[in-house]
Image (spheres, rainbow, N blue to C red):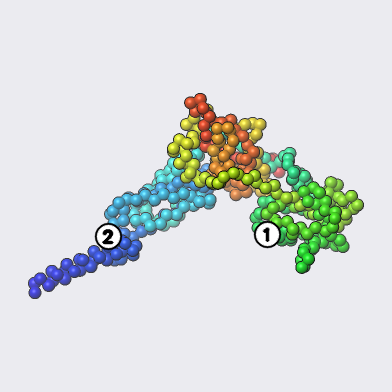
Amino acid sequence: MAGIPRRIAHARHALRRASLLTALLLGVPCAAARAQGDTTGAVGGVVRGPGGVAIVGAEVVLTPARGPGGGTVIARRVFTDETGKFQVSGLPNGRASVAVRRIGYRPAVRDVEVPLAAALTMALEAVPQAIAAVVVKDRRVKHTGWAAPFYERRERGHGRYIGKEEIDRRNAMRTTDVLRSVPGLAISTSMYGSAIRMRGARCSPLIWIDGTPALAGYLDVDNFQPHTLEGIEVYSGVSTVPVELRGPRGEEACGVIAIWSRMPEPRRRGPKKVYTADDLANLVATATVYTADQVDQAAAPDTANPIAPYYPEALKRAKTAGDVLIEFVVDTAGIPELETVGIVAASHPAFGTAARDAVAAARFIPAFRAGKPVRQLVQVPVKFELTSGS
């Protein structure tokens, strides 16, 4: 009989061990697991640079002071998203280290207690850039290309103008859906298509397509998909129609709508890889691509073909200034590798888009190392500034 309590004690011990093993295998926090401190928490936050701008693609490494149940310590590695945020769950409760780094910034480290009571904000200090900032003013510029008349008339502001930024933002299915926001337009649809009338007019407006009038008859603007358009001009009365958009026989009497198609992006041969911040960091780590401090002569802008972003029209009208830090690889011929173009930080998404679009036409003097041209990762600050009195 004396052996019975001993056998019961052994059975209870075996049951506790089985319960703990089941919890570890299935991820269920049983009472035995909780007793050994296996509760977990999460760490989330945001990484910001100077001025509080969110940093995209920053590497965040979280290292707990101890492993689950006192076991092996396993560090967790994540990257910030487009809003600069990160989130890591499943960390053992207790002390942990948060280390953040990003090319172009000085690393930062902070000790925290898991779980956090509030979101963590990590501030990084920018390293001075080797390439001087590109400054974009909101004043008028000389426009080039097939749609230059649209942009020139939009700056004069005598009609109603809808640019590609607004068209893309609305994400409309039909062009008439884009035009419904223009005051003074009456739009009707039927089995035969869409019809547009200016307020008080008894006839259809004259439609222009890429600088050519459609004089053969009324053209249904819904024949054009909104995402294929660069811009739309609307002039409701004959007095507002520019001379260059008038018809040869007074067809502009009932108003004018000028549509500009968007030039398609050039196709690239072969598979297209989009490089992330982690990919670029790996290229630098393997000496496939160099940074400015690793070369004898750093890449420099070609003054004949600089980065020349447009100033987003909506932000210009709102009198909004801002900053962008854009990065990409310059190849051995001084040409930006477009698949590597990325936004490190932007005070507004539209500024980031404008800076990104401008990279394709830019050229550089390539970097040199040991007398040979090499690929270099460059980061270019772009400042969008308002002119005085604007």
The single residue placed furthest to the top in the displayed view is: 371
Horizontally, residue 269 falls left or right of residue 39, namely right
Q: Is residue 155 visible?
A: no
Circle on res. 43: none
Horizontally, residue 291 falls left or right of residue 93, namely right
Which image quarter holds the N terminus? bottom left
Horizontally, residue 198 falls left or right of residue 270, namely right
What amino acid is found at the position of numbered circle 1 in the picture?
A: Ala
Q: Secondary structure at mark 2?
A: loop
* Residue 339, x across and y down, in percent: 56, 43
**Label 1, label 2: how far apart the Cα atoms are:** 57 Å
Q: Label 2: few (<14), some or many (≥20) within 10 Å?
A: few
The answer to which of 227 and 386 lies nearer the viewer is 227
Report which residue position mark 1 lands on: 172
* Residue 184, x across and y down, in percent: 79, 60
Residue shown at 36%/59% (left/top)? 40
Residue shown at 66%/57% (left/top)? 170
Q: Label 1: few (<14), some or many (≥20) within 10 Å?
A: some
Report which residue position mark 2 lands on: 36
